[in-house]
Amino acid sequence: MIARLRTAILISGRGSNMAALIAAARAPDFPAEIALVLSNKSAAAGLALAKQAGIATAAVDHKIYAGRDEFEGSMQAVLDINRIELICLAGFIRILSAPFVTRWRGRIINIHPSLLPAFRGLDTHARAIAAGVKLHGCSVHFVEPELDSGPVIAQATIPVRDDDTPESLGARVLAEEHKLYPAALARVAADLAGAEERTRFAQGRQRD
Ligand code: GRF
């Protein structure tokens, strides 16, 4: 059996995507195990939800550090202690530095509430309505140093209605996010675990 990848979810707020990932990972054949939920805000509602779900939690408050290097150094230490192999950003609002992202390249993914590359950044639903697009949605992508860039792993699309408000559109997109993110995590984790298994197999063969 292929080992389940030890995955950390990084949050800053309510954690509805986090909850969807935790629920999906309860299935015994899900290729990732949610081993940690880490927040930069100790009062994040998602942290309490994760605790209730019996998941290990940690808060690394960015405000107490002299700068981003120190903050990220602390996060890295917590990730290392928990033997994390894969990171899911789920409403994590701090911008991560290029060295941190590069260190995790291929092992850090994010969900963004738009059809990337359209509408990077904030207020995506209001901007989609203002632009008059007929289709909107969400994307899961690998994280690269540049904000909301990086190869797209999966997208879900929904029609924009004539009477949509940012709130009504956002609610329908969020429902899609909760289905898309677990599916995308499963794919990434299965690919990574499969690659590791193949490497181990090849190394074993070399030793024979
Ligand atoms: C979601 O809209 C996600 O796409 C964006 O931040 C929001 C997080 O919401 N990156 P939640 O904390 O998962 O409920």
Image (cartoon, grey):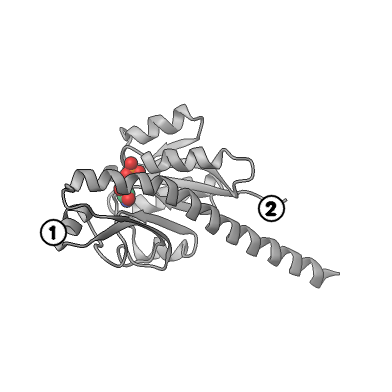
In screen coordinates, is 2 left or right of 119?
right
Q: Is residue 150 above or below residue 164?
A: below
Amino acid tagged 1: Ala
Residue 58, position as x, y percentages in the image: 43, 38
**Residue 40 in view:** no
Asked whether mark 1 and ligand 1 are closer than 8 Å, the reply comes as no
Q: Is residue 21 above or below residue 53?
A: below
Q: Residues within 10 Å of mark 2 (few under 14, many from 20)?
A: few
Return the residue found at the far top.
52
Instruction: From the viewer's side, name the closer residue of 208 and 4.
Output: 4
Return the residue found at the far right.
208
Amino acid tagged 2: Ile
Residue at the image point whose x is 25% and y is 62% from the top: 120
From the image, state whether disc 2 or disc 1 is nearer to you.
Answer: 1
Identify the disc placed on residue 191: none
Residue at the image point whose x is 34% and y is 50% from the top: 71
In which image quadrant can residue 114 be found? bottom left
**Residue 36 in view:** yes
Residue that mark 2 sits on: 2
Residue that mark 1 sits on: 130
Task: Determine whether the residue tagged by mark 1 lies in a helix, strand or loop.
Answer: helix
In which image quadrant can residue 26 be found? top right
